[in-house]
């Protein structure tokens, strides 16, 4: 009986490898993009949960956030209201040149910058990139804005309506409540590639939350 099995020729092997390479080249960027997207979403949801749990626990000892002191420097605010309730690996003070802000390092490699008397926060997905190359960071991809502000201060009731009575929330200062404005707002809209060192795109975090902590199909920043 004849054996019809035969080895592949070199040409056939090269053609097969070429096809595999083309398919990989076409699909790998999408796979990597989806992976980076999931890393971002996981860390965003985690910091949102961890911060709100810490605030809730602190309220048991320190009372309603409505009466928390909002004139403290960030380090004093941390020591009074977060210390003992929030697990961080390191704290770094930035000094007067950076609004007396502080950096809170988390075990997953992310970083939270707290400034303006503990009201405003920038969340960095990768603390090493923040330290080594902050100019390259992009809002809505590498850095995300949050706010914790339970009193009006200098804001109007309209500007603060999505923060009053809340805890740690995606930045929504002056938001009108529509999805369109999350994209188009002149000052904070998530509408193009805005670098950390320049114009802000603070609403990107709120846009992701608006879509139930997922990236919408028309999200303007690619991962």
Image (cartoon, helix red, strand yellow):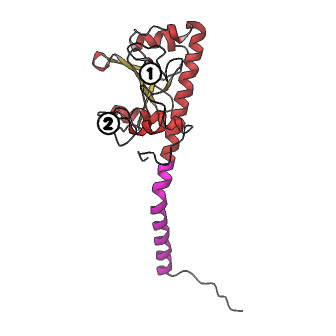
Residue 183 x %, y %: 42, 39
Q: Secondary structure at mark 2?
A: loop
Give above or below for 216 relative to 199: below
Residue at image coords 45%, 67%? 22
- N-terminal of the pair, mark 1 or mark 2, is 2
Looking at the picture, tell me which residue is in the foreground, 23 or 155: 155
Q: Nearer the viewer, residue 209 or 142?
A: 209
Q: Indicate the position of residue 9 as horizontal and vertical percent values.
A: 51, 82
Residue at 37% from the left image edge and 17% from the top image edge: 116
Q: Position of residue 184 (x, y in %)?
A: 39, 39
Image location (x, y in percent) of residue 191: 38, 41
The quadrant the N terminus occupies is bottom right
Residue 125 visible somewhere in the drawing: no
Q: Secondary structure at mark 1?
A: helix
Q: State which quadrant residue 115 falls in.
A: top left
Judging by the rendered image, the residue that carries numbered circle 1 is 158
Q: Is residue 160 magenta?
A: no
Residue at 42% x, 47% y is 222
Query: Any mark on residue 133, and which?
Result: 2
**Displayed quadrant of residue 42:** top right
**Quarter holding residue 195:** top left
Query: Mostly what secondary structure, the magenta segment?
Result: helix
What range of the chain is rendered magenta? 9-34
> Number of labelled discs?
2
Q: Residue at x 50, y 79 (%)?
A: 12
**Label 1 vs label 2, nearer the camera:** 1
At label 2, counting other C-alpha atoms closer than 10 Å, the crowd grade (few under 14, some 14-19, many 20 or more) is few
Q: Is residue 64 visible?
A: yes
Mark 1 → mark 2, Cα distance in angstroms: 37 Å
Asked if 50 appears above or below 11 in the picture, the reply is above
């Amino acid at each position: 009986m004849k054996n019809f099995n035969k080895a592949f020729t070199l040409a056939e092997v090269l053609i097969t490898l070429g096809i595999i390479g083309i398919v990989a080249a076409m699909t790998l960027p999408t796979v990597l993009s989806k992976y980076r997207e999931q890393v971002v979403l996981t860390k965003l949801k985690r910091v949102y949960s961890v911060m709100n749990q810490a605030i809730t626990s602190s309220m048991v000892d320190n009372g309603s956030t409505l009466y928390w002191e909002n004139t403290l420097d960030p380090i004093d605010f941390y020591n009074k209201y977060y210390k003992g309730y929030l697990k961080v690996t390191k704290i770094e003070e930035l000094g007067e040149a950076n609004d007396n802000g502080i950096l809170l390092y988390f075990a997953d490699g992310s970083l939270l910058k707290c400034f303006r008397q503990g009201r405003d926060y920038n969340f960095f997905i990768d603390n090493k990139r923040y330290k080594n190359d902050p100019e390259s960071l992009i809002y809505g991809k590498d850095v995300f804005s949050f706010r914790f502000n339970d009193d009006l201060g200098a804001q109007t009731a309209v500007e603060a309506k999505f923060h009053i009575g809340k805890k740690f929330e995606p930045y929504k200062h002056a938001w009108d409540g529509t999805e369109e404005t999350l994209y188009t707002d002149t000052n904070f809209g998530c509408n193009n590639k805005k670098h950390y060192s320049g114009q802000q795109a603070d609403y990107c975090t709120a846009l992701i939350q608006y879509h139930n902590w997922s990236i919408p199909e028309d999200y303007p920043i690619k991962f």
